[in-house]
C-alpha cells in the first residue's frame, strides 16, 4: 500500500465506514494515521469527557458528522442527577469557531440548551441532520432556531427528549423555501402542535420518509398528512382517544391505502383500538412496529393486528400482550430479529391473574423465531429450564437483556438461583455482545460470564452476586468488555482495586449502592492518572465538610471512565472527582 | 439453595446505601418493591424497573383498564380563608391552563401556578400521600392520578 500515492490510499479508506475499522487503520503507521485523519468524515465519541473539542478538531479537521454521548446509561433510569454534566455547548462553540463544516450532529444523553441550538443553527451553512436522543435542557425555542436557520435541513429527529414545550410556533419557523426534509420526529413534545403549519410543511417536503407525530395531532389531521405524504416509510402516529366518526375513519383508510411504502409504525399514544383496522392494509409490509406507548391496544385488537404482520423484523410491545400474545408472535413473525417487551404495570396494581409475560412467552418466541438476535424482556418470573431451552433454540443472540421485575427472585419452580440459566445463555451464544442479568444470582453466573462471554462488550448487573469474586470473574474474563454498570450488588473495594489497568481498556464503570468505600475510590484514583473517578453524593451535601469524611463510608454512586484530557471542570458541587 | 421471603432478602445489602434524593419521598426501600398496596409507605420508585422516563410517565398517566370511559374526578377546592369549599370535576379539563382559567373565573380573581408571593393567588394541591404540592410540575395525566384536593392560597402578607 505504501507504493501508492496518498490520493489512492485515501480513496480506499473512504470505503471504510465503521469507526472501529478507521481507528485500527490509523494505528498501522504514521503515514496512514495522517492520511486517515484528513479524510475521516464521521467521528464517534462514546464519552464526551474522554477527549475535548480542541483535540478533536485538531485531529479531524475535515469532519462532517459528530456523534457524542454524555451521561452514563443508568441516567436513563433517574440515577444520575440533571446537572451532572454532558453539556454540549463547549463542543458547539469550539466547532463554530473552527473551520469545520459540520453537517450532522448526533447527541445522546447530553444537556443541550436553546443557546447551543441557536449557535449551531447559525454556524454551519451546510448543516443537514440533528439527532437528539434522551437529551434535555432545551425548549421549542431552540427548535425554532434550527427550523429558521438551517436552510438545508434534512433530518430533525428528537427521540425521548425532555423538551420544555413553550407551545410556540416552531413549526411555522421552517421557511417556505425549506423543501429538503427527509425525516421529522417530534413525538416526544408534550404540548400542542400547530397542525396547519405541519400540514404545509409536509406538503412541501416530497422527500419526507420519516414522520413521527406527537400526541397533539388528531385523527383528521393524520389523514390529511398521510394523503399528502404517500411516500412515507416510517410513521409515528400521534394519539386519537376519541372513537372516530365514520367519515374521518373512511378518510384515514383512504389515505393509508395509498401509503404503499410504509414499513414502520409507532406511536399510538392513548390510541383507541377501534382505529387500528384502518392500518390493516399496511401490516403485511411492516418491518418494524413499536406499540410500547399504546397501553390501550391489548387483547384481541392487538392479536389481530400482529397476525397480519408476517414480515415483522422488529417488535416493541408492552407485557399486556401476555404469553398468549407472544405465542401468536412466534407463530406469525418468522422474520423477527429484535423483540422488546416492556412492563405495563409499575405498581402491581393490576389483577395478578393477568400476569403479564413469563418464561412461557420467552420460550415460545425462541422456538418460533429463528432469526431472533436481540431481546429485551421484562417479566414477572423465570426458570433455569426455560433459559436453557432458549439458549438451545437461539444460539445467535447478540443482545440478551432479561429484567425480572422483582429483585432477587429465584427460579419460581425450583426456588434455585438463576445462575445455571444465564450460564447456558453465555455458553451457547458465542457472539453475545450485550447482556443484562436479573433475578436471584450468586457469584457462579459471573464465573460463567467470565469464562464464556468472549465477545461481551456491555454488562448490566442489578441486585446480583454474593462476594467480590463475582465482579472479579467478569473483570478478569471478559477481554472485550467496554461498559460495566452495576447497582445494588455486594461488590466492594477488593474487586474494584484488583486490576486498575483493566479500566483503561474500557469506556466506563458504574457502581451504585454497592460496597465500595471512599477510601477504596481514593486509592483507585491515586494510581490512575488516565482515569477520572467521580463520586456522586447528592443527598450528602450536609456532610461535605472534609473533617467529617470517613474513608470507610460507602460511596452512593461511583462513575469512572478513561480519559486523555484529565479532570473535567464543569462538575456540580455534589460530584467529587478524585 | 435455601431462599427466604424475597421481601427481606431485598434489604440485605442496600437498605441504607440508597439515600432518598430530593425528588423522591423518603421511603424504607425494603418495603417498596414487594409489599402489597395496603402499606401506607408504598411509593413508586423512579429508578426501578429500569425503563426510560417517557415510558414511565406514559404508563403512570394511562387509565387503568377497570375504569369506564365516562370518567370523572371530583375534588374539593378551597380558597384560603373561605370556610365553604367548591367541587370541581378535573376530567372536564384538558390541562393546567384550562383548570386555572376555570378557577379564576369561579373565584373571580387571577389564579396562577408556581411559588407563593405577595401578589398572586397560587394554586396548590394535596397528593395521595397527604403532601401539599405546587401545581404544574408533573404532566397533567400524572396529576390526575395523584391529586386529592385543591387549595388556593392568598397573597402572602408580612
Image: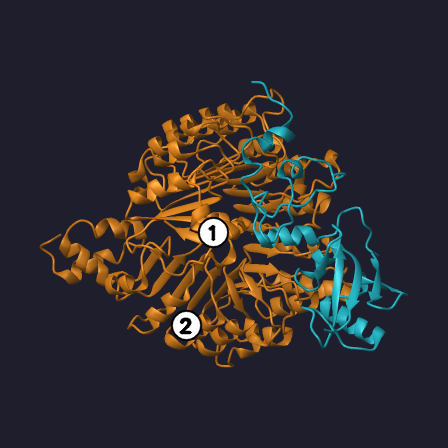
Note whether residue A344 is visible: yes
* Residue appearing at x 61%, y 69% in the figure: A225
Looking at the picture, how far across and down is residue A285, in whole percent?
Answer: 56, 52
The residue sitting at the top extreme is: B1
Give the label on residue A544, or none: 1
Looking at the picture, how far across and down is residue A306, in whole percent?
Answer: 63, 45
Provide the residue designation for mark 2.
A120
Q: Are marks 2 and 1 on the same chain?
A: yes
- Characterize the local packing of mark 2: few (<14), some (14-19) or many (20 or more) Cα atoms within 10 angstroms: many
User: Total marks drawn?
Assistant: 2
Q: Chain of mark 2?
A: A
Q: Is residue A449 above or below residue B97?
A: above
* Residue appearing at x 59%, y 32% in the figure: B10
The residue sitting at the bottom extreme is: A176
* Residue appearing at x 63%, y 64% in the figure: A190
- Label 2, label 1: how many angstroms apart (C-alpha)? 38 Å
Q: Is residue A447 above or below residue A122?
A: above
Amino acid at each position: 500500500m505504501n507504493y501508492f500515492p496518498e490520493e489512492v490510499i485515501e480513496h480506499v479508506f473512504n470505503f471504510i465506514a465503521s469507526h472501529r475499522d478507521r481507528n485500527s487503520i490509523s494505528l498501522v503507521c504514521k503515514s496512514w494515521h495522517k492520511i486517515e485523519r484528513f479524510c475521516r468524515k464521521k467521528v464517534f465519541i462514546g464519552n464526551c469527557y474522554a477527549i475535548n473539542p480542541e483535540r478533536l478538531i485538531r485531529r479531524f479537521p475535515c469532519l462532517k458528522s459528530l456523534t457524542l454521548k454524555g451521561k452514563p446509561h443508568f441516567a436513563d433510569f433517574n440515577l444520575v442527577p440533571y446537572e451532572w454534566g454532558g453539556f454540549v455547548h463547549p463542543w458547539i462553540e469550539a466547532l463554530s469557531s473552527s473551520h469545520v463544516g459540520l453537517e450532522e450532529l448526533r447527541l445522546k444523553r447530553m444537556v443541550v440548551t436553546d443557546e447551543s441550538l441557536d449557535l449551531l443553527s447559525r454556524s454551519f451553512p451546510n448543516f443537514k441532520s440533528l439527532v437528539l436522543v434522551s437529551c434535555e435542557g432545551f425548549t421549542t425555542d431552540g427548535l425554532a432556531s434550527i427550523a429558521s436557520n438551517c436552510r438545508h435541513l434534512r433530518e430533525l429527529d428528537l427521540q425521548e427528549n425532555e423538551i420544555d414545550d413553550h407551545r410556540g410556533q416552531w413549526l411555522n419557523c421552517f421557511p417556505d423555501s425549506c423543501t429538503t426534509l427527509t425525516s421529522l420526529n417530534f413525538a416526544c413534545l408534550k404540548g400542542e402542535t400547530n397542525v396547519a403549519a405541519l400540514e404545509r410543511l409536509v406538503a412541501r417536503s416530497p422527500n419526507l420518509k420519516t414522520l413521527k407525530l406527537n400526541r397533539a395531532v388528531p385523527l383528521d389531521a393524520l389523514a390529511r398528512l398521510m394523503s399528502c405524504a404517500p411516500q412515507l416509510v416510517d410513521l409515528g402516529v400521534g394519539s386519537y382517544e376519541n372513537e372516530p366518526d365514520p367519515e374521518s375513519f373512511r378518510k384515514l383508510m383512504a389515505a393509508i391505502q395509498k401509503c404503499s411504502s410504509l414499513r414502520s409504525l409507532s406511536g399510538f399514544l392513548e390510541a383507541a383500538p377501534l382505529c387500528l383496522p384502518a392500518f390493516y392494509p399496511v401490516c403485511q409490509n411492516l418491518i418494524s412496529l413499536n406499540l410500547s406507548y399504546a397501553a390501550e391496544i391489548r387483547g384481541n385488537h392487538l392479536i389481530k393486528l400482529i397476525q397480519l404482520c408476517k414480515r415483522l423484523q422488529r417488535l416493541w410491545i408492552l407485557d399486556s400482550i401476555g404469553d398468549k400474545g407472544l405465542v401468536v408472535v412466534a407463530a406469525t413473525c418468522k422474520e423477527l430479529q429484535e423483540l422488546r417487551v416492556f412492563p405495563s404495570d409499575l405498581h402491581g396494581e393490576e389483577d395478578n391473574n393477568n400476569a403479564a409475560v413469563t418464561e412461557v412467552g420467552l420460550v415460545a418466541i425462541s422456538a418460533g423465531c429463528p432469526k431472533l438476535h436481540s431481546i429485551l424482556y421484562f417479566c414477572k418470573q423465570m426458570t433455569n429450564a426455560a433459559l436453557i431451552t432458549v439458549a438451545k433454540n437461539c444460539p445467535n443472540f447478540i443482545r440478551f437483556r432479561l429484567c425480572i421485575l422483582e429483585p432477587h427472585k429465584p427460579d419460581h419452580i425450583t426456588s434455585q438461583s438463576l445462575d445455571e440459566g444465564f450460564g447456558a445463555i453465555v455458553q451457547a451464544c458465542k457472539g453475545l455482545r450485550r447482556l443484562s442479568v436479573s433475578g436471584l444470582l450468586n457469584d457462579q453466573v459471573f464465573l460463567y460470564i467470565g469464562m464464556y462471554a468472549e465477545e461481551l462488550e456491555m454488562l448490566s448487573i442489578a441486585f446480583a452476586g454474593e462476594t467480590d469474586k463475582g465482579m472479579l470473574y467478569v473483570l478478569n474474563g471478559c477481554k472485550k468488555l467496554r461498559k460495566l454498570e452495576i447497582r445494588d450488588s455486594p461488590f466492594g473495594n477488593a474487586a474494584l482495586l484488583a486490576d486498575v489497568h483493566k479500566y483503561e481498556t474500557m469506556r466506563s464503570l458504574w457502581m451504585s449502592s454497592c460496597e465500595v468505600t471512599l477510601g477504596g475510590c481514593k486509592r483507585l484514583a491515586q494510581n490512575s492518572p488516565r482515569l477520572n473517578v467521580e463520586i456522586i453524593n447528592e443527598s450528602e451535601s450536609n456532610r461535605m465538610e472534609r473533617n467529617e469524611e470517613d474513608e470507610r463510608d460507602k460511596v452512593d454512586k461511583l462513575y469512572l471512565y478513561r480519559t486523555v484530557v484529565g479532570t473535567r471542570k464543569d462538575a456540580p458541587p455534589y460530584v467529587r472527582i478524585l | 439453595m435455601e431462599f427466604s421471603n424475597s421481601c427481606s432478602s431485598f434489604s440485605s445489602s442496600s437498605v441504607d446505601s440508597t439515600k432518598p434524593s430530593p425528588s423522591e419521598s423518603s421511603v424504607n426501600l425494603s418495603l417498596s418493591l414487594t409489599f402489597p398496596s395496603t402499606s401506607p409507605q408504598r411509593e413508586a420508585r423512579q429508578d426501578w424497573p429500569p425503563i426510560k422516563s417517557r415510558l414511565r410517565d406514559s404508563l403512570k398517566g394511562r387509565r387503568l383498564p377497570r375504569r369506564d370511559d365516562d370518567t370523572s374526578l371530583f375534588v374539593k377546592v378551597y380558597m384560603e380563608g373561605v370556610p365553604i369549599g367548591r367541587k370541581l370535576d378535573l376530567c372536564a379539563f384538558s390541562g393546567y391552563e384550562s383548570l386555572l382559567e376555570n378557577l379564576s373565573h369561579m373565584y373571580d380573581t387571577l389564579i396562577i401556578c408556581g411559588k407563593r408571593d405577595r401578589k398572586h393567588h397560587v394554586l396548590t394541591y394535596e397528593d395521595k400521600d397527604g403532601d401539599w404540592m405546587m401545581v404544574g410540575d408533573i404532566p397533567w395525566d400524572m396529576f390526575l392520578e395523584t391529586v386529592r384536593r385543591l387549595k388556593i392560597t392568598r397573597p402572602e402578607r408580612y
